[in-house]
Amino acid sequence: MAIDFELYRRKLPVADNPTVRLSVIDIAPDRASRTLVFLHGYGGRARQWQYQLHEFSIANRVIALDQRGHGGSDRPAGPYTMTQLVADLESALDGLAVQFPIILIGHSFGGAIATEFTVNHQEKVSDLVLIATAGEFQLNPFYRALLRMPPPVLRMLTPFVRGWLSAPPHVMHAWYHQAIAGWNGWSRFRSLQMPVTVIRGHHDRVFSKSVFEEVARAIPRAEEINVGASGHLVMLERREAVNRAIQRTLERTARSWREDTVGEGDPDRTALMRERPWLAFYDEGVPYTIAIPRVPVLELLHSAANRFPSKTALEFEGFRMTYQQLQTQVNRFANAVLSSRINKGDRIMLLLPNIPQMVIAYFGTLAAGAVAVFSLPGTGKEDYLQQIHQTEARMVVTLYQSEGIIQSLLAESAMNRSPVEHLILTRPQDYLPLVKRLASRSKKIHLGFVSGRSGERFKIHDFERIIAVQINASPELEISPDDPAVIQFTGGTTAQPKGVTLSHRNLVANALQTRHWMPAAQEGRERFLSVIPFAHSYGLTTALNVPVSLGAAIILKAKFEIADMLRTIKNQKPTIFPGVPSMYVAIKDYPRVRNFRIDSIKACISGSAPLPIEVQEAFEKLTRGRLVEGYGLTEAGPVTHANPLYGQRKIGSIGIPLPSTEACLVDLTRGAKEVKPGQIGELAVRGPQVMLGYWGDPVSTRRAFTRNGFLLTGDVAQRDAQGYFRIIARKADMWYPHKPDKPAFPRDVEEVLFEVPQVKEAAVVAIANQPIAFVIAQGEQLRSEDLIAYCKRRLPPELVPRFVVFVDDFPRTFIGKILRRELARRFEEIQKEHQRA
């Protein structure tokens, strides 16, 4: 998969008076084997190394600079002497905290700068690679004549050379006269003491042939590689040959566990594979670790808008918005937020379905430096209000149709009890095509106020109107990757929901980890079907952040309705569909589903609940794509595990950890001690996607982590020898009937209950260390005594349910998970009623 280099670009100050900043691409994966530094030549730029950066960034830290005056770097009046250019390199390496020695790779005059740096710092360079580098650089007479023109005249040529030169003519003039024309490298070459590789093409006509051919002979013990048919830009024209030549240089140094050429006896590889045995089962093209760019989440959108400005970003019921249009709308929303005196770090609650306004408000909130707060769909009004108070949200964005929330906020504001100062209202149809918009006019709620009335602490605004008056420019704010980005409330299946605080780095990391798990995904060409609510962490990452990182089209669906979904698949032809098992079941079981041509879907990662193998097989047969089960939790961004899309998948398994993710099982009672493969323990994970903590709850945050920084997931699991994990139960659901080292799990009882044909669904909850069974029955009448009697024949006495409660349905989250804490509350109410009777 292609790497988005712009996410790894940063501006680095290298000089004062005047201030000069170099634009630097710096990709640093975990446990990088070496550091490779690439220097472009005269008129070049860092992106000329794109093929080398992609090839070698998997295992190594790779750095490519836009040199002074070139590419995205500053273009001061001067100086452009060799001394200054070397000083820029020295300052850049210091600013990047590079660990020496490095491998230095230079093209053309970049090779001359690399040579000068190496001569001055022989101890800091382990290997030097010179590509199309000459001993002296004398241009042909025509170019020399051009460069004798005064800089003001050369500036007029800028529009004509912008397409093939990455520096303006006046910079080219200064480079040539101050550094290039007077440089002679023959004596400098002879003083090089480290291994040097000289790479050149056969038809380089920029400079005379002799100044290239003599370079390798002038350097003691240099290795020359003539890659043949190529001009001056060898690394672009013969990229594979150049990569092979650089690889030979790397093989002279200590080998890495990441390289296919490493022998089995290599200690680094052996140690890592013993620590992470699952790496052997990664699909081809999935890196073991990834470099996490130190950028805020908004850079995912900035990069997509820069690379694919005219590509469709959002599709919503016939409405389309390009990435450039989305960027403009986001900027306007951010400016509206700032004009409302919302400060950096303030919280904005977004109570919206998957409509364009949700995407705009999410990225706009982050662009304003604020924190987006999400509450799960289906949350009750009182819980919404409690979460607003808990996070002290100063702004709420929701639908005009949310009458209950609106009236409650108005009432609280009247009593001066609400932290909310601004309420922004919108309608789904506001971003529909004109015909549909006119045909679906919805009622406006009469609130008895004038929008935006001054002099009041609580103001209400219309979404379209508030952004229409704003400017298009992006706000200029310094946002750190470690700043909080979102607060997402957990589902609360076993306890009260907590506000999980995720940083920009957490979200960027998980988006890229998930993106790299789909190595065949193509930038700018994929189409995501996004029906999983963005308010859920799984939806936010897999259905929004990941497609934006790919520059993909996002097909928005406000809710899941099977007939509408199938029509959308038929008409819009999505290629990637993140979802939950219940969605895939509904599609699989729909009558004449093949008529909807769902075979456009080529990849799906199912999350939030176990994926039955029957569903997986049937869905893959229908789509001819790949459907795999994954795992995650809100506290980890959320995705931590998934089965390989194309490799080995295991039935009932959540798969293996994603790149840059560590996972282990710890003892259920002592917590810190790691258990062996095959044993049951609590799943613990560590990686760049793991949360900052619980909002306003430092005690719970401390309890969530082990001493060595692993997040305790609260899930009981097993791991096999190959590194595949299987979830057993929630730790909060287990109980200890007798011995403290022998827990019991709901599944122990539920599987026996499912053996009874009349039992459609069953859920077991331990109350006061006693199992209580809740059952949905079907068919013939079933009595609790019959079920208890059956369990007595199949289970040890301590696991036999003490009571059986028949219910019509279970309380569930919006994705179908059973809320066991609600079942426990219902049982307690039943007990109280019996006591009163």
Image (tube, rainbow, N blue to C red):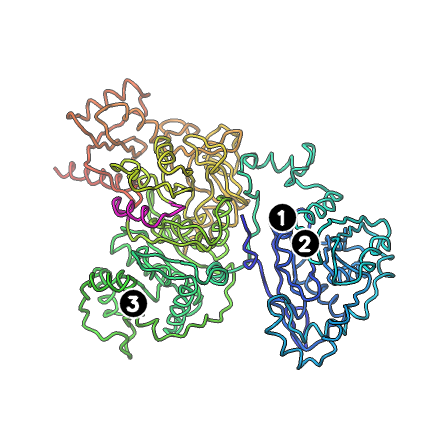
> Alpha-carbon neighbours of circle 2 within 10 Å: few (<14), some, or many (≥20)?
many
The answer to whether 787 appears left or right of 677 in the picture is: left
Q: Residue furthest left?
A: 837
Q: Are marks 1 and 3 in contact (CB under 8 Å)?
A: no
The answer to whether 722 appears left or right of 831 in the picture is: right
Q: CA distance from mark 2 to mark 1?
A: 12 Å
* 814 within the magenta span: no
Question: Badge 2 is on which residue?
Answer: 235
* 561 within the magenta span: yes
The residue stretch that appears in magenta? 560-578
Quadrant where the C terminus sits is top left
Q: CA distance from mark 2 to mark 3?
A: 55 Å
Question: Badge 1 is on which residue?
Answer: 55
The reply to whether residue 631 is visible in this rendering is yes
Question: Badge 3 is on which residue?
Answer: 423
Q: CA distance from mark 1 to mark 3?
A: 49 Å
The answer to whether 387 appears left or right of 5 in the picture is: left
The reply to whether residue 345 is visible in this rendering is no
Give the residue type that dot 3 points to: Leu
